[in-house]
Image (tube, coloured by chain):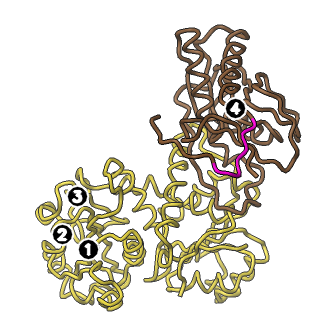
Amino acid sequence: MRRHLIGIEGLTKEDIYSYLNNAATFVEVSERELKKVPPLRGKTIVNLFLEPSTRTRVSFEIAGKRLSADTINVGASDSSITKGETLLDTARTLQAMAPDIIVMRHKESGAPHFLAKHLEKTSIVNAGDGMHEHPTQALLDLLTLKHHFKERSAGIEDLTVAIVGDIRHSRVARSNIWAHLALNNRINLVGPPTLIPEEFRHPRLFGEKINIIHDLKTGLRGADVVICLRMQLERQTDKFVPSLEEYSQEYCVNERALQAANPGCVVLHPGPANRGLEVSSAVLDGAQSLMQKQVNFGVAVRMAVLFALATGKTVSEGKSE
Amino acid sequence: MANKMNAVPSNWKTIVDAETISRSISRMSYEILEKDRRLNNLAIVGIRTGGEYLAERIRRKIKEIEGVEPQLGVIDITLYRDDLSNSDLQPTLKGTDLPFSISGARIVLVDDVLYTGRTIRAALDAIIDFGRPACVELAVLIDRGHRELPIRPDYVGKNLPTSKGQFLRLKLSEQGFPDGVYSIE
């Protein structure tokens, strides 16, 4: 049977833990002298990255290679998309080459789902689609937290998570929201009203699990985890705020603002960061920041996802529409 | 270790009892020592999950006899299996822990039941990924036959002819069941 990972929405807590637990083994593999294991030998993975990305693409490529798969990278500039080929035609061409997994990054929300619907024999992994989801980023955030909170009896549950910044344009935020809802954590969405999407305002859907807060200090109060989001200037986010200077005065996560959070609070950032805009350099390079760990765990989480899609027959793919 | 003991499910039939297991562990430990008394490079490595606690028991026995504790490791062979693409369930990885240098070590691989030999083939590949051991030996509590690969054990607790469809499992008190090899119907 063919399986996909399109989003975190629709995954259960058990699905999430199954990825995280297997990822622990891949962390160990990544620390070996010989960083390669054989389970995906003979499988072909196409990394179809039609939007710029360095860390996610490199991370998926290393993950595939460490599992012994053959990985091929296709970018926007070296694909026929620049010659006007439609996504469906590109997909069919790739399908004819019979890859087992296509890892896809696309600027349009829903593109990986579209591919999954039209390709019959290939598993699709969403590596970020428009403003929809970036499931492996949320999983690596969780793995980073699981590692950090390993001595805590509730682990990564019973946490207060503040997600701060440009939530509207952020697929990282959406995937993290679904992940923390699945874990039953409390979520504060913090930012100016223009950058908080309507979809999370329905108390009927999200009960008391999601709080929308427009004041940074109030939003960070009692937080165990702060997820800073990149201000997506390429999506013209600056049109949603009076000015970037004003935005950073109100919403930049700096040491002073962090004092409102819990003493053991940690800070995540999916990178690349706009230093001084959504987060201060002092916080990003400080003791509470787990940013470097996030990069390290990225490969292990992606190994766990590729391994799951290529092996067992029962994987939940998350809600795709 | 102070696990609470579970009742043995009614579909489990004891085919090797606790006393026989204990005698077998004892004899295998003596045989391991007889072959080579130098303990400084000896490592007992259990294969998850059946061999994990058995390896610990063998190590304890060797310590009882010689007063020196050999190294102990555990390996998960899931990533090295030859049937991963056909497995129905999502494979669960439990991790490998070899807290010593494999290069130059005398490794005694430990598993509960030796059957087709495919697990041992996978275990050998997993070990070699960590270095070049001086030698690898194989200790199993039960040899039930039906080998599909050219693999033979060096130390055997008990030879037990079985039919192919049978499902055997060693359970030890560490896992919450009375020591025994059970045939699960």
Residue position for label 3: A265
Residue position for label 1: A164
Q: Residues within 10 Å of mark 3 (few under 14, many from 20)?
A: some
**Residue at (58%, 75%) from the top-left corner?**
A317
Q: Left or right of A86: which side holds A242?
A: left
Q: Residues within 10 Å of mark 2 (few under 14, many from 20)?
A: many
Kindly identify which numbered label has been placed on residue B17.
4
Q: Earlier in the sequence, mark 1 or mark 3?
A: 1
Residue B144 vs A142, above or below: the answer is: above
- SS label for mark 3: loop
Residue B100 vs A22, above or below: the answer is: above
Q: CA distance from mark 3 to mark 4?
A: 53 Å
Subunit that carries the residue with mark 2: A
Disc 2 vs disc 4: which is toward the camera? Answer: 4
Residue position for label 2: A220
Amino acid marked by disc 2: Leu
**Does the image show residue B99?**
yes
**Tags 1 and 2 touching, CB below 8 Å:** yes
- SS label for mark 1: strand
Q: Residues within 10 Å of mark 4 (few under 14, many from 20)?
A: few
Q: Position of residue A22 (x, y in %)?
A: 55, 54
- On whether residue A260 falls in the magenta region, the answer is no
The magenta-colored residue range is B9-15
Q: CA distance from mark 2 to mark 4?
A: 60 Å
Q: Left or right of A162: which side holds A301?
A: right
Amino acid marked by disc 1: Val
Subunit that carries the residue with mark 3: A
